[in-house]
Amino acid sequence: MLYQEREEYIKKELEKKSFVKTMDLVNILDVSIDTIRRDLKKMEEKGLLKCARGGAASIDNTTVISTFHEREIKNIELKREAAKKAIMMIKENSTIALNSGTTNTILASEMLSLKFPFTVITNNLSVIQILKNSPFIDIICIGGFLDKKENSFYGQTCENEFSLYNPDIAFLSINAVSLENGFSDFRYNDFPIINTLVNKSHQCIAVMDSTKFGKKSKKNILKLNDIHLLISDHLISDLQKNSFKEKGLKII
């Protein structure tokens, strides 16, 4: 396969996934790892991507709004890695709040591995469906107007119900984060819910995969220091961690 053909394939994969792994490209394109590394470096020099540990990422710094299902399967392994870290924060008999968002559906799936009692408060219908058969997890369902596209409940009723609780931890699924803009999102209905959880929860933790870093979405919703901790995946560099730490946000 010629370089031009490999470049075109990599560009299409980045449009779909935002991140491609070097070894996946080696196996699919049937070339050496050195060839792929040279290809990625050449594409980075042309401004087509950004090389990262283990692969390359899209350089688009604006999030693309897609369907719930498309977002749910996108970067699923990176989301799962972050989710596995997040569940380590959950203690027995604690109360956990989850907002809408695809990362929290992955987090809910990982919660099923926990074999001790705790309570989940959520407006996320996908989370409710995942957790409903667990013998260990009590679920408090926050209702309201059902947004079928987001598979979550919103509205004044939802906001009022969330305000009645004081969760030990709120795990927040948010669309984008950057040093310049803080946390931003496109789900206007979710803004007041996120703010309520920030104000009512003992600890607020954002759970975001690395493809959401350095990007911006429709509206800035939180400052970096509004969140106690950000949990992500292994693709976050020490330089990124230190840069955010200087702004008051710890990343693990």
Image (tube, grey):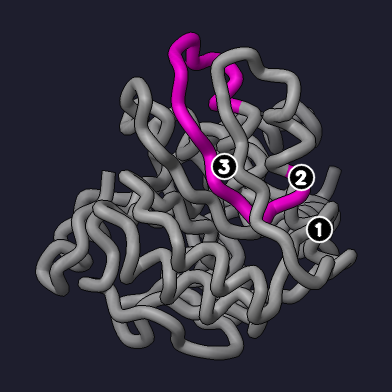
Disc 2 to disc 1: CB gap under 8 Å = yes
| 21 over 175 or under it: above or below | above
Q: Say which quadrant the C terminus sits in.
A: top left
Instruction: Tell me if I can see residue 3 in this picture.
Output: no
Task: Kindly identify which residue carries mark 3.
Answer: 79
Q: What element carries label 3?
A: helix
In the image, which is nearer the foreground, mark 3 or mark 1? 1
If you read the primary sequence from the N terminus, does the residue marked by circle 3 or circle 1 appear first? 3
Q: What residue type is labelled 1?
A: Asn
Q: Say which quadrant the N terminus sits in.
A: top right
Q: Residue at x 81, y 58 (%)?
A: 151
Q: Is mark 2 on a helix, strand or loop?
A: helix
Residue 115: where, in percent of width, then height?
49, 10
State how many labels appear.
3
Residue 36: where, in percent of width, then height?
61, 42
**Picture quadrant where residue 59 is located:** bottom right
| 138 over 212 or under it: above or below | above
Q: Which residue lies furthest to the bottom in this view?
A: 219
Q: Which amino acid does label 2 sit on?
A: Ser
Task: Kindly identify which residue carries mark 1.
Answer: 151
Q: Is residue 28 left or right of residue 57?
A: right
In the image, which is nearer the foreground, mark 2 or mark 3? 2
Q: What element carries label 1?
A: loop
Q: In this view, does 44 lie to the left or right of 27?
A: left
Q: Residue 126 carries which label?
A: 2
The magenta segment is: 110-126
